[in-house]
């Protein structure tokens, strides 16, 4: 077995791992990156980019459904060529992966080690059966994998996760999708708009990333108006049959139905890849999911020499967060024991469904009742949204009841990806509702809807201030 001694050993060559490696190298340290699978990030291979390619095709197909209301007539009908759709998804996906591979190719061969890494002690890793690495510090950046409920595992090749979809040669006729969360809503709606019959099943009325009950209820109604979605499904049985899977369930009207689909898609969350890392051979404290306990501002696991970044820590499983965390972990690993906390960016999560969804800053559920007010706006009568026939949505912004500082927002609506960014920037600058209202708002734009919600919040803040002054008097 080959023996190797390094300053920083990075386990995983995804977004977080590559950022950690680069940060350690930039600090002048001897670092290696260990990868047990194919190079290429989750985002490029099976996440952000291929899913948006599928969504783009779905949006193009769906746009024609609005033509009659605009007064546009079409001879004939739109035909969706599933093979052509998936060919473009795979082709462009491979192009994005290629960009990642080029950056990996720039890493010296001596710094890239192939194989599965396992801790054998607090300062040693074995890689496969060929290399033993003695490290001063290490960064765990092993990413995550789709979680599959036990009730679906027996389906074999009729069970898919989002990773599998982007390798399809053609579109199926019908699928059942379990989990109307971020991944499920994006993929389920896209497949529906591309002509696939979609049955979407959830539980506990959870839809999207929302914790605000009013916003979640609006989102549920919005998606139910387009496709079959039961957010608290009663599935009686699931059986493999010739050509697919038979599902018996009670529908939204209480009627028992049986449907046969080609595939079942599990979009029921992702689990950190921390199993089989040999963490039991370290002194690290682990949480209930087996993830090392860590500080999100330093990414340090306890007081140890080991750091954890990206989806592996299950804190904020998003690409921009993984890049930030990889850099922070790599820098702190390089200068250990001089570990420094780094302020994190304002939380921002976006779902590229239609309408789009976004959660910014603190969620509704994270705020103590009585400490905040909620500014509201519906996009159903918002000017620009109606002009574009995209007038579905509800925005709630949360502001500190005493200071007026923006705390968070949950929204479904047109251009939520852009409104979310504006709010995240304002929150990171710790702006008050009054200060944001001093900013320019053009007419007519969707952003005027945000201004309406802020004006609602401002009026409530003024009323709260008046009530407080009266109580004091």
Image (cartoon, rainbow, N blue to C red):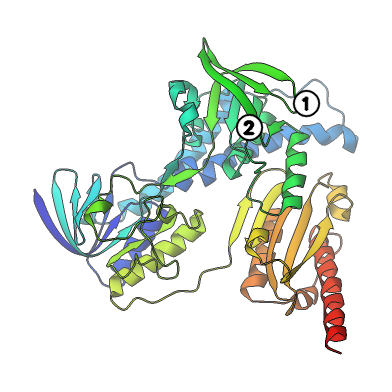
How dense is the environment of label 1, judged by Cα within 10 Å: few (below 14), some, or many (20 and up)? few
Element type where label 1 sits in the image? loop
Nearest the eye: 191 or 375? 375
Q: Residue furthest left?
A: 1
Q: Position of residue 141 (x, y in %)?
A: 36, 55
Q: Position of residue 175 (x, y in %)?
A: 59, 24
Instruction: Give the number of the disc on residue 201.
Output: 2
Q: Is residue 414 visible?
A: no
Q: Is residue 258 above or below residue 277?
A: above
- Which element is circle 2 on? strand
Vertical relation: 346 (above or below) 55: below
Side (left or right) of 168 relative to 402: left
Q: Is residue 285 left or right of residue 393?
A: left
Name the residue tied to disc 1.
Answer: 253
Which comes sooner in the sequence, label 1 or label 2? 2
> Residue 302 sits in which quadrant?
bottom left
In this orientation, which residue lies closer to the viewer: 122 or 324? 122
Q: CA distance from mark 1 to mark 2?
A: 14 Å
Viewer-closest of 390 and 239 = 239
The residue lying at 81 percent from left, 46 percent from top is 392
Q: Residue at x 40, y 62 (%)?
A: 326
């Amino acid at each position: 077995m080959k023996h190797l001694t390094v300053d920083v050993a990075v386990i995983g060559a995804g977004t977080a791992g590559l950022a950690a490696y680069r940060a350690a190298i930039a600090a002048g340290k001897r670092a290696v990156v260990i990868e047990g699978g194919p190079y290429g990030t989750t985002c490029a291979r099976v996440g952000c980019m291929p899913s948006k390619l599928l969504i783009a095709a779905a949006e193009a197909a769906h746009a024609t459904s609005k033509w009659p209301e605009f007064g546009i007539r079409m001879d004939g009908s739109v035909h969706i060529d599933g093979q052509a759709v998936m060919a473009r998804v795979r082709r462009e996906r491979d192009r994005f992966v290629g960009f990642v591979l080029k950056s990996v190719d720039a890493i010296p061969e001596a710094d890239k080690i192939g194989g599965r890494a396992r801790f054998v002690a607090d300062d040693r890793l074995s890689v496969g059966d060929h290399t033993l690495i003695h490290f001063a510090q290490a960064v765990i950046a092993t990413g995550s994998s789709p979680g599959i409920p036990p009730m679906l595992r027996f389906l074999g090749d009729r069970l898919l996760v989002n990773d599998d979809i982007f390798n399809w040669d053609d579109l199926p006729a019908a699928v059942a999708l379990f989990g109307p969360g971020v991944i499920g809503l994006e993929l389920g709606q896209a497949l529906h708009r591309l002509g696939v019959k979609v049955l979407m099943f959830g539980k506990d009325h959870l839809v999207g990333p929302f914790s605000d009950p009013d916003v979640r209820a609006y989102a549920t109604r919005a998606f139910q108006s387009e496709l079959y979605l039961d957010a608290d499904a009663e599935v009686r049985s699931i059986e493999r049959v010739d050509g697919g899977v038979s599902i018996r369930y009670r529908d939204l009207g209480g009627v028992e139905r049986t449907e046969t689909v080609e595939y079942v898609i599990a979009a029921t969350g992702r689990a950190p890849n921390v199993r089989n890392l040999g963490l039991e051979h370290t002194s690290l404290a682990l949480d209930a999911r087996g993830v090392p306990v860590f500080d999100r501002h330093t990414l340090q696991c306890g007081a140890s020499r080991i750091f954890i970044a990206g989806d592996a820590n299950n804190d904020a499983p998003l690409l921009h967060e993984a890049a930030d965390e990889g850099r922070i972990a790599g820098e702190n690993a390089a200068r250990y024991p001089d570990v420094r906390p780094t302020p994190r960016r304002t939380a921002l999560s976006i779902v590229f469904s239609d309408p789009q969804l976004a959660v910014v800053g603190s969620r509704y559920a994270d705020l103590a009742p009585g400490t905040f007010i909620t500014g509201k706006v519906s996009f159903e009568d918002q000017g620009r949204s109606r002009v574009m026939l995209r007038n579905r949505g509800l925005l709630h912004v949360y502001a500190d009841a005493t200071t007026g500082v923006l705390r968070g927002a949950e929204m479904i609506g047109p251009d939520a990806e852009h409104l979310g960014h504006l709010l995240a920037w304002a929150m990171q600058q710790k702006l008050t509702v009054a200060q944001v209202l001093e900013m320019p708002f053009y007419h007519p734009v969707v952003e005027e809807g945000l201004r309406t919600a802020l004006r609602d919040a401002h009026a409530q803040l003024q009323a709260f201030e008046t009530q407080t002054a009266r109580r004091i008097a």
